[in-house]
Image (cartoon, rainbow, N blue to C red):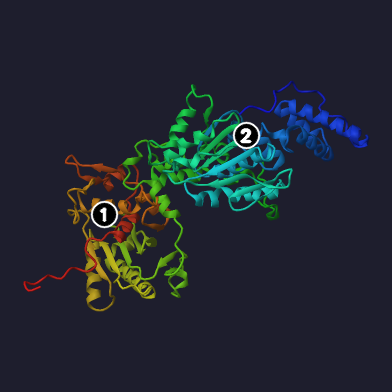
């Protein structure tokens, strides 16, 4: 995208004196203002911005901007070649170095790829690019299109920023949910920007859009389907068309469209494409870059702070690396803003876990929030279905584990219930009593949901787990609870092995992991898996930590706890309690044995 006019050497005097503009006749004011506008439009960006802010009064700036509008067709034409200047001068907001570099790259490149780490303000940045682009060209000649993997991301992540910025800065027009409408000189509303998402296989999604100036913003670019990504070229055929693709690198797709685009941006033979990575380590809170005060937070709080407050700090980076391990795809993508290699070697890819944690709760008849069921022990706000079965998974800190954990599954919703560490977990009676407490809570929930299914409790039977299972089964016989207690020996051979399956488990532990993987795996038709996760960060990290290996005979094998500890990872007790809650080693109702006369 070329600049509006060629840069000229800076003038020593950019504007007439204030007195001359304020006290001359209107016609002369207009003529002088037109001269000033012409000088500013020709001046280098730095000199222009300095002169506009410091050499002119507020009244003079307003008059000059009207002359700029006359010359360029836009009141904000002075900032056509400086998006960062628009954000700082017009929106009155602060930027740090990487944000400034990304915004200004859109002026000189047709494609700008930004692989970004966690918390660096990528969506905030994309929204400012959209507002800049729609305001520096004449209304009716420029169109900004925003897209993302899912419409929910468009609607609830990017567009709230746009809807906030437009009225706060006093910009022309108004925003609805995913549209920015601006008035034309004829008094009509022109849709200057809109957001949408397209199905992964929709070839026509990026066709049939024409405008003199087009900016395509691809948010959450790491999840964009290849067909949609490659279709963006259909919009970038004109001389004044550009694309900003920004997002976390894909964690489990080694051939994603976004990775291809980022590789292209690093290739010197592709001058129209540039890649500007922003890792979490670039955060001013870590680099100690001197950054401006934050102007985005409400002034009413009286809390004056710099932009660094909103950026990841070293403590967050250290904790993330400790939780996942330095070579984990999550860390490589979210911290270092790089594309993991061999991400497909993880049993449950991190993106599947993230998706399961972000799915919206269903609504309508038959769905109830747990906190609305009238049970004192149920305070969670996610929804569950009438008649859903309730299941518990218990890992009793055996086999080198360091936590006793309990997770619960209600229909398709997985939730955290208990975790404890220490010497108390060595007492199998105390552990069994805690599980019994969770059983009673689960039974009350099942009753409130009118579930026809008994509560099922799957317990890791290794170590002291054997004694816990025996006690729970005995308490069922004596009437202390009505749950079905199932002991699981993870070292046994799998109970459900299909010889024709692509991945055949080697042991029961592998079977459990593969069964859970199948529940997380997105369905091609809907794009989502079958679980909703309401769990803690530790469980989420552990679910996407073990590597998927194979034996010499071709069986699928999950990385052992010993191998995980060797690379600095803790025992995945929480994840395996989730696995136990989901795993069904036996049918809910065993079939009756048929007699000879049946």
In this rendering, the label closer to the viewer, 1 or 2: 2
**Among the two numbered marks 1 and 2 on one chain, the one whose residue lies closer to the N terminus:** 2
In this view, the residue in front, 381 or 320, is 381
In the rendered view, tell whether residue 462 sits above or below residue 84. below
In this view, the residue in front, 498 or 546, is 498
Determine which residue is flagged by label 2: 212
Residue located 35% across and 68% down the image: 388
| Dot 1 crowding, Cα within 10 Å, few <14, some 14–19, many 20+ | many
Location of residue 413 in the rendering, given as x and y in whole percent from the top left corner: 39, 61
| Dot 2 crowding, Cα within 10 Å, few <14, some 14–19, many 20+ | few
Left or right of residue 164: residue 524 = left
Residue located 62% across and 43% down the image: 307
Where, quadrant-wise, is the N terminus in this rendering? Answer: top right
Where, quadrant-wise, is the C terminus in this rendering? Answer: bottom left
Residue 166 visible in this rendered orientation of the protein: yes
- SS under mark 1: helix
Determine which residue is flagged by label 1: 512
Q: Residue furthest left?
A: 596
Location of residue 503 in the rendering, given as x and y in whole percent from the top left corner: 23, 46
């Amino acid at each position: 995208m070329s600049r509006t006019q060629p840069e000229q050497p800076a003038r020593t005097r950019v504007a007439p004196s204030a007195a001359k503009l304020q006290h001359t006749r209107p016609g002369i004011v207009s003529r002088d203002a037109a001269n000033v506008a012409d000088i500013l439009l020709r001046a280098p960006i730095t000199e222009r911005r300095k002169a506009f802010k410091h050499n002119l009064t507020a009244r003079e700036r307003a008059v000059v901007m009207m002359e700029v509008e006359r010359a360029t067709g836009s009141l904000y034409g002075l900032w056509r070649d400086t998006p960062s200047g628009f954000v700082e001068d017009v929106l009155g907001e602060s930027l740090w170095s990487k944000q400034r570099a990304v915004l200004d790259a859109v002026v000189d490149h047709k494609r700008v790829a930004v692989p970004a780490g966690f918390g660096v303000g990528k969506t905030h940045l994309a929204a400012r690019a959209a507002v800049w682009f729609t305001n520096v060209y004449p209304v009716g000649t420029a169109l900004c299109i925003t897209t993302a993997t899912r419409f929910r991301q468009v609607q609830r992540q990017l567009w709230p920023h746009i809807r906030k910025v437009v009225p706060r800065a006093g910009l022309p027009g108004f925003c609805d949910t995913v549209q920015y409408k601006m008035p034309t000189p004829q008094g009509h509303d022109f849709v200057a920007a809109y957001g949408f998402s397209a199905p992964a296989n929709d070839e026509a999604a990026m066709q049939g859009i024409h405008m003199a100036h087009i900016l395509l913003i691809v948010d959450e670019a790491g999840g964009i389907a290849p067909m949609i990504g490659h279709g963006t070229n259909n919009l970038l055929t004109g001389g004044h068309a550009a694309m900003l693709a920004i997002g976390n690198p894909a964690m489990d797709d080694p051939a994603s469209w976004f990775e291809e685009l980022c590789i292209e941006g690093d290739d010197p033979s592709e001058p129209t494409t540039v890649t500007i990575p922003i890792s979490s380590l670039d955060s001013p809170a870590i680099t100690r870059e001197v950054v401006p005060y934050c102007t985005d937070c409400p002034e009413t709080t009286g809390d004056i702070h710099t932009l660094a407050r909103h950026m990841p700090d070293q403590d967050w980076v250290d904790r993330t690396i400790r939780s996942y391990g330095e070579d984990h795809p999550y860390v490589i993508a979210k911290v270092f803003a790089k594309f993991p290699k061999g991400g497909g070697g993880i049993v449950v890819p991190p993106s599947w876990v993230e998706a399961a944690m972000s799915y919206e709760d269903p609504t309508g008849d038959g769905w109830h929030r747990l906190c609305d069921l009238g049970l004192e022990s149920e305070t969670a706000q996610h929804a569950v279905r009438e008649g859903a079965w309730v299941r518990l998974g218990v890992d009793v800190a055996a086999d080198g584990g360091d936590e006793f954990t309990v997770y619960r599954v209600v229909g398709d919703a997985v939730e955290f219930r208990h975790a404890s560490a220490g010497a108390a977990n060595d007492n199998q009676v105390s552990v069994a009593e805690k599980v019994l407490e969770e059983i009673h809570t689960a039974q009350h929930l099942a009753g409130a949901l009118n579930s026809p299914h008994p509560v099922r409790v799957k317990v890791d039977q290794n170590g002291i787990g054997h004694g816990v299972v025996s006690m729970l089964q005995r308490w069922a016989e004596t009437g202390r609870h009505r749950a079905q207690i199932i002991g699981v020996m993870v070292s046994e051979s799998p109970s459900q092995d299909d010889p024709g399956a692509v991945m055949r488990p080697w042991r029961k532990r592998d079977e459990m992991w593969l069964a859970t993987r199948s529940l997380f795996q997105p369905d091609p038709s809907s794009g989502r898996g079958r679980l909703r996760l309401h769990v803690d960060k530790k469980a989420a990290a552990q679910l996407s930590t073990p590597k998927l290996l194979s034996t010499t005979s071709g069986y699928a094998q999950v990385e052992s706890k010993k191998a995980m500890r060797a690379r600095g990872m803790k025992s995945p007790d929480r994840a395996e309690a989730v696995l136990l809650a989901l795993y069904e080693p036996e049918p809910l109702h065993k079939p009756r044995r048929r007699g000879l006369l049946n």
